[in-house]
């Protein structure tokens, strides 16, 4: 079952190639991005090992239940609510970004509301699945999508116009100190393991021997995320694009296939990947928030998950109305910035739980 | 005790005497005044066997009772209702002195072993099951030689027709929880008539309205024995040459038994062929609509133009065209299943060749559409288990509808939705849709 952990991590990595991570990183392309990548990889790996070593002490238990068992009620409720919100935002950012992308690049006539409705329909279905089935969905969608995705990445690197000189030019800024947001944005791609706070309930024996591959994949992934746009579009343009990767992929073509523009394959794949990422994040959020939702029971069946998911949907619709693209990017940066404290706190809470558990 | 025997006799008389095939015989021995009475249904029993095993010895020997007790097919008397049940299944009731003895005298004219027609293989075993439950049990036992193979006969199912039902499983491999669960669900079946295992499958599923088969219906003894060795449970029903295998996972439905008999790479190739067939039949019609009506820029320019060129004469949007041709194709398939075999080929020729050609010439559909419909029709039947390929036939239209409304985004979303729906299904209590079968902690069966 440990391979599901790998899937969760990989999902988080590739899902963020398109949304706001490259934009946030490339904005600081000439000041501190390079060191930011390295720093975030180191921090990410350390956090991951810290977290995994601790969660391993509680086989087949999720953090929400552990908190309920070992901590006082006020802390338990407060902390669950905060965590739930963090995960909810992780999902809703991806959702809104993809509504935006679909409207711009795939189906301009449909209007954002219809797209949002369509996405929410399938996301709700996925969120309400039981955790184990969701892991099965995750595995199957990734297995269908990954080969094509890797093919696109390889195609990007072997592109005729890929200029390694631009990459080198950007890399010369390696000595500049990154900002907090850059490190956080880079760190975000490593955070797939945090989903384990809920999914650990279904993992009997966590094997973390293979985890040394995670920083490697992460580095390659981060490198691809920022340097492929730089390599293909030059040093100036990528920092100005809203979606650097989409513009990059749109400059690639398959000469001998029936589909000429790589962009469409890429986008269609990414709709699937992003929906999956939203489902996973919201599912985790749902499990954190269950404790603070009102108890709605009828005939022995609890309706509070439905209630929470309905609130998720309504609030994302509301956010979609108020947040234009710029605001959304600002919120996202705020959210990125709060990541490091959130993880530190989560790890400390786990540490405390272990001590309480021993007593 | 005397009273009891007579009352039972009277009871039987009043219950079945109104049929012409009911037989009440009294045999009197001329010398030592012994008298036996026989009750049976002539249509179900082997009268020659009765003559040979009961009537003749009765007149020839002196101590008949001990002889009778040693006969093959002897059953003890339990109560009136069970006796009636037995009589209705070909048992003869024998009244001797103050005792009631039951003998199985049944013959089943329908024990012929059928050829495997539904799931054919080229070089695998060629015969399927028969329509007789005893024959089937014996066929399975002859393929699975393990002392741990258990045959359990359950209560009859169907309130009106009371069909016999049996469970078979390897008790060292099958999950005892699953066995218990399946027994519990079989007890709950409440339906007037049960004629096929398909009905049992629907009755034991928690929801009556499922689209996908979550238990496998098969006719192949080799598949049954393979599944028994994997720890699955087999449900046999009398009167049908198909059995039900529980639990199943989605990927079982994509495998033919032939895969085990072919060389490794050949079977991998066949498997990948089947999956591409599945994807083609699911995604191609919907993808055509998505590309033609929403994003023609996806294709390279030459292809996009040639598709547009063939659609020049077609006066309506692509989904009407697709729907029109697909429904024609479905009618054709349905007609050729129901028609007698001799007429079937005519229908396919007329429908497939002439109608398709004429539709193109009349400008109702494009040439490319014909190619798509043909490939969908063919690839749909690549799925080896019939129930699954029928389910996929339906799913295709759902994807078609959502794509016609929302374009290629809808296609992707619909496809993910399909995966979610499949993952939500359970076969018995096991997850239905997942990549690997044996896995801790919810190990299905292979090790107990």
Image: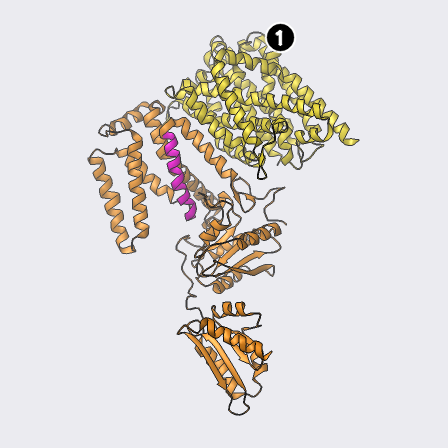
Above or below, comparing residue B37 to residue B19 in the picture: below
Of the chain colours in the picture, the one used for chain A is: yellow
Query: Looking at the image, which residue is at 51% across and 64% down?
Result: B138
Question: Between residues B315 and A36, which one lies in front from this camera angle?
Answer: B315
- For numbered disc 1, what is the local secondary structure? helix
* Labels in figure, total: 1
Q: Is residue B395 magenta?
A: yes
- State which quarter of the image contains the N terminus of chain A: top right
Magenta-drawn segment: B384-403
Of the chain colours in the picture, the one used for chain B is: orange
Residue B292 visible here: yes
Residue A45 point in image, percent of width and height: 65, 22
Residue B77 point in image, percent of width and height: 57, 72
Residue assigned mark 1? A175
Quarter of the rendering containing residue A56:
top right
Main SS class of the magenta portion in the image: helix
Above or below, comparing residue B397 to residue B222 in the picture: above
- State which quarter of the image contains the C terminus of chain A: top right
């Amino acid at each position: 079952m440990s391979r599901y952990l790998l899937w969760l991590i990989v999902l988080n990595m590739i899902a963020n190639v398109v949304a706001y991570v490259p934009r946030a990183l490339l904005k600081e392309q000439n000041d501190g991005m390079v060191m930011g990548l390295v720093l975030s990889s180191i921090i990410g790996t350390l956090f991951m090992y810290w977290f995994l070593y601790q969660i391993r002490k509680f086989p087949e238990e999720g953090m929400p239940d552990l908190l309920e068992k070992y901590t006082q009620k006020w802390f338990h409720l407060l902390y669950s609510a905060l965590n739930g919100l963090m995960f909810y935002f992780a999902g809703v950012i991806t959702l809104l970004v993809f509504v935006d992308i679909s409207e711009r690049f795939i189906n301009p006539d449909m209007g954002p509301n219809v797209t949002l409705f369509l996405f929410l329909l399938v996301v709700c279905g996925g969120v309400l699945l039981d955790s184990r089935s969701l892991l099965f969905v995750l595995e199957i969608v990734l297995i269908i999508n990954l080969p094509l995705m890797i093919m696109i990445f390889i195609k990007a690197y072997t592109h005729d116009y890929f200029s390694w000189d631009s990459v080198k030019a950007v890399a010369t800024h390696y000595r500049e100190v990154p900002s907090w947001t850059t490190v956080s944005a880079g760190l975000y791609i490593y955070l797939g393991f945090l989903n384990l706070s809920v999914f650990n309930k279904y993992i009997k024996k966590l094997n973390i021997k293979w985890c040394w591959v995670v920083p490697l994949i992460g580095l390659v992934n981060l490198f691809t995320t920022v340097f492929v746009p730089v390599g293909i579009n030059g040093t100036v343009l990528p920092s100005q694009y809203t979606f650097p990767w989409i513009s990059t992929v749109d400059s690639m073509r398959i000469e001998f296939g029936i589909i000429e523009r790589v962009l469409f394959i890429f986008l269609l794949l990414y709709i699937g990947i992003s929906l999956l990422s939203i489902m996973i994040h919201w599912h985790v959020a749902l499990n954190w928030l269950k404790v603070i939702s009102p108890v709605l029971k009828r005939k022995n069946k609890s309706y509070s998950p439905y209630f929470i998911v309905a609130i998720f949907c309504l609030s994302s619709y509301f956010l979609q109305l108020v947040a234009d693209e710029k605001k959304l990017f600002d919120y996202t940066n705020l959210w990125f910035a709060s990541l490091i404290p959130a993880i530190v706190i989560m790890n400390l809470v786990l540490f405390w739980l272990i001590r309480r558990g021993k007593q | 005790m005397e009273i009891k025997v007579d009352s039972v006799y009277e009871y039987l008389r009043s219950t079945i005497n109104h049929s012409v095939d009911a037989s009440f015989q009294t045999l009197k021995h001329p010398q030592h005044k012994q008298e036996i009475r026989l009750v049976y249904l002539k249509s179900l029993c082997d009268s020659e066997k009765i003559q040979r095993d009961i009537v003749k010895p009765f007149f020839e020997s002196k101590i008949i009772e001990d002889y009778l007790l040693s006969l093959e097919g002897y059953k003890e008397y339990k109560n009136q209702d069970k006796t009636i049940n037995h009589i209705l299944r070909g048992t003869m009731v024998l009244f001797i002195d103050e005792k009631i003895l039951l003998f199985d005298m049944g013959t089943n004219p329908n024990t012929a072993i059928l050829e495997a027609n539904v799931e054919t293989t080229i070089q695998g075993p060629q015969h399927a099951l028969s329509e007789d439950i005893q024959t089937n049990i014996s066929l399975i036992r002859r393929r699975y030689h393990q002392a741990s193979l258990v045959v359990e006969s359950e209560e009859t199912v169907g309130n009106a027709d009371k069909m016999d039902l049996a469970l078979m499983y390897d008790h060292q491999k099958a999950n005892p929880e699953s066995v218990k669960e399946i027994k519990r669900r079989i007890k709950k079946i409440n339906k007037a008539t049960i004629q096929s295992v398909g009905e049992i499958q629907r009755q034991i599923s928690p929801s009556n309205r499922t689209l996908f088969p979550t238990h496998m219906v098969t006719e192949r003894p080799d598949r049954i024995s393979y599944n028994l060795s994997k720890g699955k449970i087999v449900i046999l029903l009398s009167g049908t040459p198909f059995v039900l295998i529980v639990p199943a996972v989605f990927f079982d439905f994509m495998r033919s038994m032939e895969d085990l008999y072919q060389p490794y790479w050949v079977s991998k190739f066949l498997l990948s062929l089947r999956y591409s067939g599945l994807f083609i039949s699911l995604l191609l019609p919907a993808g055509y609509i998505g590309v033609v009506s929403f994003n023609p820029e996806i294709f390279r320019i030459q292809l996009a133009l040639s598709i547009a060129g063939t659609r020049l004469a077609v006066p309506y949007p692509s989904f009407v065209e697709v729907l029109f041709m697909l429904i024609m194709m479905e009618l054709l398939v349905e007609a050729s299943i129901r028609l007698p075999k001799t007429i079937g080929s005519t229908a396919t020729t007329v429908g497939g060749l002439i109608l398709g050609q004429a539709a193109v010439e009349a400008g109702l559909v494009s040439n490319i559409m014909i190619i798509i419909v043909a490939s969908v029709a063919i690839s749909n039947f690549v799925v080896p288990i019939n129930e699954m390929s029928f389910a996929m036939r339906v799913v295709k239209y759902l994807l078609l509808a959502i794509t016609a409304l929302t374009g290629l985004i809808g296609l992707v979303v619909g496809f993910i939705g399909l995966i979610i729906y499949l993952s939500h299904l359970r076969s018995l209590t096991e997850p239905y849709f997942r990549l690997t079968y044996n896995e801790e902690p919810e190990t299905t069966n292979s090790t107990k």
